[in-house]
């Protein structure tokens, strides 16, 4: 069906990865090392947003507590570093596993509900996590925890500074996003979208809907946890604010902005959002305002998100949506 | 801990609950009737608090301040409805979340532009500054009595409006079936605008009244939005009566939690653990309440929607 | 050509053990008794029709059989396996499959994708996360075969939601058939179809008869009398009577309650039944 578009978009993805890999050298050459950290942050949030897109866009589960899993991953790093662990790979893997476990537990309960109740319960769990970590004085409480040193990077890349961490993050993100892309096209991915489109029929066809959703939720939580763990290393600091509902809302905004249910909607949305945030910050002290106006504009005029504007099917849908909205 | 303290906390809880009700009533009507997720409802609360604080300081009159706050919020809401909300009816909830989140961002920076980033002082009106002897040995801040009184009065007014007036009937008709109501000649669009404005006015009043006893700052809207959402879920989306009962429950549970959980924890665990966990457990109380209610009544206490 | 039920080789009395057995099913919605002590059975090779006026509780009964609703009392058994407390998807594994009164397909997907979704459910685990589904030729073959059964093979690339109503209903039935079920629940498959399409559907159902037990809920009396070995009449949630087509046709109460007005309707194109049947 989409094979032509699929193969051309695959080339585009390869080009983007190569460009991203080359970026630190380009940035250093232009004297703009600061942006290496910035793009690294975009990569991390691309992962977080994509993981939400998996359950939201493809699974139809509107969860407003996803930042909670990011937070679990981040705090797993804090707890381990506090206990003396120094390997980045170990930290990030445990972060991912801890978040996946949390997602499995939270999902097992939340997925028994639907609609707005699901939204509220996922929100409630994330807020609970927030308050728990605010109260844990050992790990900084409300003030947060500062990570004194960088962990050891794999492949002996220590001492490579910002670029080294950048490449490791890039590698991890590429791997996970590749796995996600495969999952979308797999039987599981199709079953997930089937549940989104017609849950009753899927049950009637014999699909174990609850179990499929729970697995998706767990995988998404784990990926978000990995993003959180990388964020902890990237920032060198973790505070409970990371899990506040406004953070969950921001990740959600990224997904919707980029295009829910579209393969790279999460990544594109994160990139667009963070780029615009940065750009507006440079221009004015009141940078929330143009961002907010932009969100309103996208909601009204490009409801399928930015990525939809750049595909032929998207363009048709855009005109169709405009016709309907007016 | 004695009876006086307990009564004080109960009164505080009721007061907080009534203010939550003002917010929740508007929210439940908008979500229940118009099926719109309006995250910016908290921003109306913030607007009311700021306008009231500034006008009070400028004019010296609390009454004028409250009226100004209501006027400002209603005007802002009317503009918001005409320019934006109207185009969000019938749209999918994610688009609504996106747009109203944008409104939160814009409002927060607008407030920052107008009045600066620091929190603002909202003075307590002089006439109500002192304590009032409710019962012998129970002095209670007079201002908080005003909150209790006005909260009850407004609740009563809403009850009469929704259940005993034609407008209320129209609102309830629009809630249960918009299409049908329209076919029967109800100007549903006008009713919606009215409901939205009413919700805004309530939020504005709540902000104006809460100002003197809460922190008036950017982001106060987001802080109170979550409790308000919890209230409407517990109460049942679309039900004002449910919002009332749930708001009082949440207000009481929250206040009682904050007052009584830390001492209980201290009795069981070490003081440092109690100090750590106390606030966390109190915050969690309302979520535990929500989970408990939903497990018995999955659509809330007084589910209004079909 | 469809043989009428009376000419069928198998008669009512010589049926084997029932495939589906429903005993004393009860369902209440608040104070309203939607299903009142309903008992019936369907045997392999039989088409058992369920008829009754609108609001009689036919779809409520079907929903309880398929697992969408939990009965308040009673027992459901399929080929010896008790279904009463099984969730919907487990009943499919036990051999039950249904189509829906209000057409329930994947409207934004192509016909092929719709069929693939159905075939995938019965061709191994869906917890496969790595291999692209498009690489599985066997699934596609299965989907195409299913399409051919219902004459949909030329429409594979069409978007399901854009198809005419009757074709969507055919798709709905195709999805139910993917399970190769022991018991097929057909909830008004002929709703909204013109005479030609109805004829085709009747032939299809007739051809399925030897492969499975079929419970057919229908308003189209022509089809019912052409296909049914037995008919159960449901009125106000209760079974009025069960019998052969002939017995039902001549049953005085049934004529009074239901068939009287139906005689005039059966010649015309049917409008889809209102929800709540």
Image: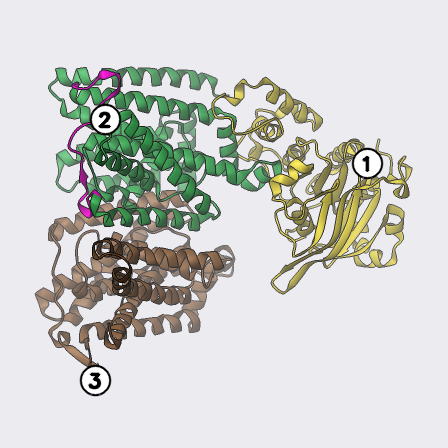
Question: In the shown orientation, is residue C139 left or right of residue A73?
Answer: right
Q: Position of residue B167 (x, y in %)?
A: 41, 68
Colour chain C is painted in: yellow
Q: What element does badge 2 sit on?
A: helix
Q: Position of residue A158 (x, y in %)?
A: 19, 19
What is the span of residues highlighted in magenta in the rendered image?
A: A139-160
Q: Position of residue C239 (x, y in %)?
A: 78, 56
Q: CA distance from mark 2 to mark 3?
A: 65 Å
In percent of the image, x 41 and y 59: which residue is there? B234
Q: What element does badge 3 sit on?
A: loop
Q: Which residue is mark 1?
A: C45
Q: Which chain is represented by green in the image?
A: A
Q: Which residue is mark 3?
A: B136
Q: Nearer the viewer, residue C88 or C197?
A: C88
Q: Nearer the viewer, residue C31 or B167?
A: C31
Q: Nearer the viewer, residue A137 or C138?
A: A137
Q: Chain of mark 2?
A: A
Q: Nearer the viewer, residue B42 or C154?
A: B42
Q: Which chain is represented by brown in the image?
A: B
């Amino acid at each position: 069906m989409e094979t032509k578009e699929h193969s051309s978009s695959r080339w585009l993805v390869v080009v983007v990865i190569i460009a991203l890999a080359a970026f630190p050298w380009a940035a250093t050459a232009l004297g703009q090392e600061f942006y290496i950290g910035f793009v690294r942050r975009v990569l991390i949030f691309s992962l977080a947003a994509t993981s939400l897109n998996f359950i939201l866009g493809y699974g139809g589960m509107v969860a407003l507590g996803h930042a909670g899993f990011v937070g679990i991953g981040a705090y797993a790093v804090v707890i381990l570093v506090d206990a003396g662990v120094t390997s980045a790979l170990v930290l990030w893997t445990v972060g991912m596993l801890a978040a996946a476990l949390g997602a499995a537990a939270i999902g097992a309960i939340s997925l028994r509900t639907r609609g707005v109740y699901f939204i509220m319960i996922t929100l409630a769990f994330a807020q609970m996590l927030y308050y728990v970590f605010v109260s844990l004085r050992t790990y900084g409480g409300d003030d947060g925890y500062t990570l004194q040193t960088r962990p050891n990077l794999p492949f002996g890349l220590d001492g490579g500074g910002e670029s080294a961490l950048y490449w490791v993050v890039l590698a991890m993100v590429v791997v996970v996003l590749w796995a996600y892309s495969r999952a979308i096209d797999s039987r599981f991915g199709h079953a997930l979208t089937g549940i989104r489109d017609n849950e009753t029929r899927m049950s009637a066809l014999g699909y174990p809907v609850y179990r499929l959703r729970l697995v998706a939720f767990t995988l998404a939580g784990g990926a978000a946890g990995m993003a959180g763990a990388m964020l902890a290393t990237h920032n060198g600091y973790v505070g409970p604010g990371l899990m506040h509902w406004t953070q969950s809302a921001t990740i959600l905004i990224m997904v919707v902005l980029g295009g829910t249910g579209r393969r790279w909607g999460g990544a594109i949305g994160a990139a667009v959002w963070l780029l615009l945030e940065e750009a507006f910050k440079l221009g004015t002290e009141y940078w929330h305002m143009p961002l907010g106006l932009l969100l309103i504009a996208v909601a009204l005029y490009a409801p399928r998100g930015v990525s939809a504007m750049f595909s032929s099917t998207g363009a048709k849908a855009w005109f169709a949506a405009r016709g309907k909205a007016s | 801990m004695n009876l006086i303290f307990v009564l004080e906390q109960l009164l505080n809880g009721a007061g907080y609950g009534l203010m939550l009700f003002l917010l929740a009533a508007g929210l439940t009507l908008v979500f229940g009737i118009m099926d719109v997720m309006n995250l910016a409802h908290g921003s109306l609360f913030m607007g009311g608090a700021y306008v009231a604080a500034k006008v009070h300081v400028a004019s010296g009159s609390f009454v004028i301040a409250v009226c100004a706050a209501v006027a400002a919020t209603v005007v802002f809401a009317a503009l918001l409805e005409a320019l934006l909300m109207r185009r969000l009816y019938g749209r999918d909830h994610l688009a609504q979340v996106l747009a109203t989140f944008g409104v939160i961002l814009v409002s927060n920076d607008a407030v920052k532009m107008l009045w600066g980033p620091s929190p603002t002082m909202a003075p307590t009106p002089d006439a109500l500054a002192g304590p009032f002897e409710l019962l012998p040995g129970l002095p209670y801040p007079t201002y908080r009595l005003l909150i209790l009184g006005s909260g009850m009065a407004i609740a009563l007014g809403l009850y009469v409006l929704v259940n005993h007036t034609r407008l209320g009937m129209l609102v309830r008709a629009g809630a249960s079936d918009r299409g049908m109501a329209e076919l029967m000649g109800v100007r549903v669009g006008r009713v919606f605008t009215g409901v939205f404005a009413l919700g805004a006015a309530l939020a504005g009043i709540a902000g104006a009244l809460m100002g003197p006893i809460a922190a008036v700052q950017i982001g106060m809207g987001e802080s109170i939005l979550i409790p308000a959402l919890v209230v409407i879920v517990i109460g049942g989306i679309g039900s004002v009566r449910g919002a009332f009962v749930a708001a009082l429950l949440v207000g009481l549970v929250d206040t009682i939690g904050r007052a009584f959980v830390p001492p209980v924890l201290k009795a069981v665990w070490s003081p440092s653990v109690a100090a750590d966990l106390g606030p966390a457990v109190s915050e969690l109380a309302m979520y535990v309440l929500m989970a408990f209610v939903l497990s018995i009544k999955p659509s809330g206490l007084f589910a209004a929607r079909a | 050509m469809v043989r009428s039920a009376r000419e069928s080789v198998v008669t009512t009395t010589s049926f084997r053990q029932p495939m589906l057995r429903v005993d004393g099913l009860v369902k209440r919605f608040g104070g309203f008794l939607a299903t009142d002590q309903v008992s019936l059975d369907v045997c392999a090779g039989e088409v058992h029709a369920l008829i009754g006026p609108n609001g009689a509780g036919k779809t409520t009964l079907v929903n309880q059989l398929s697992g969408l609703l939990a009965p308040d009392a009673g027992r459901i058994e399929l080929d010896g396996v008790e279904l009463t407390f099984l969730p919907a998807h487990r009943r499919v594994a036990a051999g039950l499959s249904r189509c829906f009164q209000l057409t329930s397909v994947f409207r934004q997907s192509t016909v092929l994708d719709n069929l693939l979704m159905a075939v995938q459910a019965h061709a191994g685990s869906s917890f496969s996360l790595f291999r692209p589904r498009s690489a599985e030729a066997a699934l596609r073959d299965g989907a195409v075969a299913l399409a051919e059964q219902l004459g949909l093979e030329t429409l594979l690339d069409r978007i399901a939601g854009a198809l005419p109503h009757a074709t969507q209903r055919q798709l709905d039935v195709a999805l139910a058939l993917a399970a190769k079920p022991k018991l097929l629940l057909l909830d008004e498959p002929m709703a909204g179809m013109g005479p030609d399409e109805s004829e085709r559907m009747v032939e299809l159902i007739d051809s399925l008869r030897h492969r499975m037990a079929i419970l057919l809920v229908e308003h189209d009396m022509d089809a019912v009398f052409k296909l049914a070995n037995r008919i159960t009449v449901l009125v106000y949630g209760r079974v009025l009577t069960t019998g052969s087509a002939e017995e039902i046709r001549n049953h005085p109460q049934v004529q009074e309650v239901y068939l009287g007005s139906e005689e005039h309707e059966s010649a015309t194109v049917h409008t889809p039944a209102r929800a709540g049947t």
